[in-house]
Amino acid sequence: MQRRDFLTSSALTAAAVSFALPGMALGGESKAGNALLETATDCTKKAELCLQHCVESLSSGSKAMAACAASVREMAIYCEALAKASARKSKHLKALAKIALEACQDCEAECRKHKQMQVCLDCADACAACAKECAKA
């Protein structure tokens, strides 16, 4: 699979997650569960946009966004899983939320280093919100 195909596939996955998962939570989910689902989904969506920005920067030869790309990619793994686990009321949600909390904090710290770029600031803010909800879980 070529990089362009991968990025297109990732963007489509993020879009599907952002539209499908919130609707799944409407059937009797607690307010806290909804908040975790919403913030994890938003974090995943913002991560895809930030990662795309990082890849574009890296492809132009700049290494400035390498650490940001790595932390965003790592965080997105856990937030996507967290959104799914929250929607499905997984018995492992609390354990996953603990891991996602750490990944979100790491990503937020890295993205804040690039606060002059709106996409990084948006990702950092989404990570902060998700980390706050993870701490409640």
Image: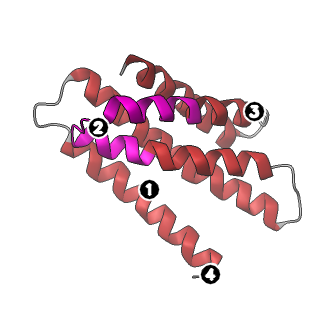
Q: Which residue is mark 1?
A: 14
Mark 4 element type: loop
Q: Which residue is mark 4?
A: 2
Residue type for callout 3: Lys
**Marks 1 and 4: in contact by CB < 8 Å?**
no
Can you give x and y, in whole percent of width and height, for residue 87 in the image? Answer: 25, 41
Q: Is residue 53 left or right of residue 92?
A: right
Can you give x and y, in whole percent of width and height, for residue 47 in the image? Answer: 56, 47
Instruction: Please tell me whether mark 4 or mark 2 is closer to you in this view.
Output: 2
Q: Which residue is mark 3?
A: 115
Quadrant in which the N terminus is drawn: bottom right
Q: Which residue is mark 2?
A: 86
**Marks 1 and 3: in contact by CB < 8 Å?**
no
Quadrant in which the C terminus is drawn: top left
Mark 1 element type: helix
Query: Badge 1, how many Cα within 10 Å: few under 14, some, many 20+?
Result: many
Instruction: Please tell me whether mark 2 or mark 3 is closer to you in this view.
Output: 2
> Is 88 within the magenta?
yes
- Tell me the residue at 79%/50% (across/down): 65
* Quadrant in the picture for residue 71: top right
Q: CA distance from mark 3 to mark 1?
A: 23 Å
Residue extent of the magenta highlight:
80-103
Residue type for callout 4: Gln
